[in-house]
Image (cartoon, grey):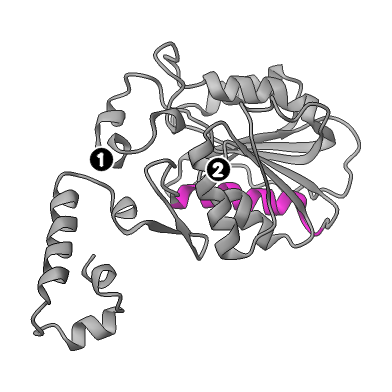
Amino acid sequence: MLRHVLGVGAVWLEAHRDDALARNDAEAFAALVERRACGEPVAYLLGFREFYGREFSVTPAVLIPRPETELLVELARQKVGGSGTARLLDIGTGSGCVAITLALELPGVSVVAVDIAADALAVARANACLLDATVTFRESDWFAALAGQRFDCIVSNPPYIAEGDPHLAEGDLRFEPPHALHCGPHDTSGLDAIRHIVAAAPAHLDSGGWLLFEHGYDQAEAVAALLAAAGFDDIEQHRDLAGIVRVSGGRLPGAVRGITRKSSRP
């Protein structure tokens, strides 16, 4: 936080550790420390968070990018592979970290990202501009603004925490946008958003296209059942670095049009 206030790097700070702070710098640093002591996330204090080797601007309007979500990016890269004509959709984009990363990692792929929150889309658009990524952003309640459009791969990090879960009252989650964490008081399982995405995705996937999404640590069995019930083939579930099944997905039956099939089942 002190490096942020002074606009310097770690080496400079170490070399000048005994220097006196200017009054305005000391006050700015003390204000950040006080906010952090109250639990406010460091990402919101500094205004950015690293994701997949890049810095993304974050505000309280968006979920803070987390390392676990990088698994979703890796899997989407595998499925799309080297297909430069693929179309990819990110549902509930938030800061845009997933959509923008995929646009930068998969040159030539057409990426569309949607979110229901206008303030979140403003952050995502700013990030795309800063990182020089080509992404089409649209304000949409899930698939509502995408009638008739189909994609080769759909990804999402949707709300998946059940209302009333004690984790919502702990740590960074206390400060993050509620709509990005859970679907409201009637969502007692945390699966409402996932259930909607899985049911609606087939109408927006080309034959052989993939749906991939992040979910909670205890939802693997339930989401696999949802995917099977919706008619998805080749259902996969992938573990994060902590060994938790964190991302699930499946392939819409039909011809595979340039999309790579690569499994890393647990």
Name the residue type under label 1. Answer: Gly
| Residue 164 visible in the snapshot | yes
The mark total stands at: 2
Q: Position of residue 208 (x, y in %)?
A: 84, 37
Name the residue type under label 2. Answer: Leu
Residue under the point 11% across and 77% down? 21
Residue under the point 32% across and 37% down? 173
Residue under the point 72% across and 27% down? 201
Find the residue positioned furthest to the front. 24
Label 1, on which residue? 171
The image shows residue 18, relative to residue 175, as above or below, that is below
Q: Is residue 259 left or right of residue 175?
A: right
Any magenta on residue 81?
Answer: yes
Disc 1 versus disc 2: distance between alpha carbons?
A: 25 Å
Tag 1's secondary structure? helix
| Residue 241 visible in the snapshot | no
Q: Nearer the viewer, mark 1 or mark 2?
A: 2
The quadrant the C terminus occupies is top right
Label 2, on which residue? 121
Disc on the earlier residue, 1 or 2: 2
Q: Position of residue 2 (x, y in %)?
A: 21, 69
Q: Position of residue 30 (x, y in %)?
A: 12, 60
The image shows residue 59, relative to residue 211, as above or below, that is below
Find the residue positioned furthest to the bottom. 15
The quadrant the N terminus occupies is bottom left
Q: Dividing the picture into quarters, in which one does residue 199 lie?
A: top right
Q: Nearer the viewer, residue 255 or 235?
A: 255
- Residue numbers of the magenta segment: 67-82
User: What secondary structure is the stretch in magenta mostly built from?
Assistant: helix
Any magenta on residue 165?
Answer: no
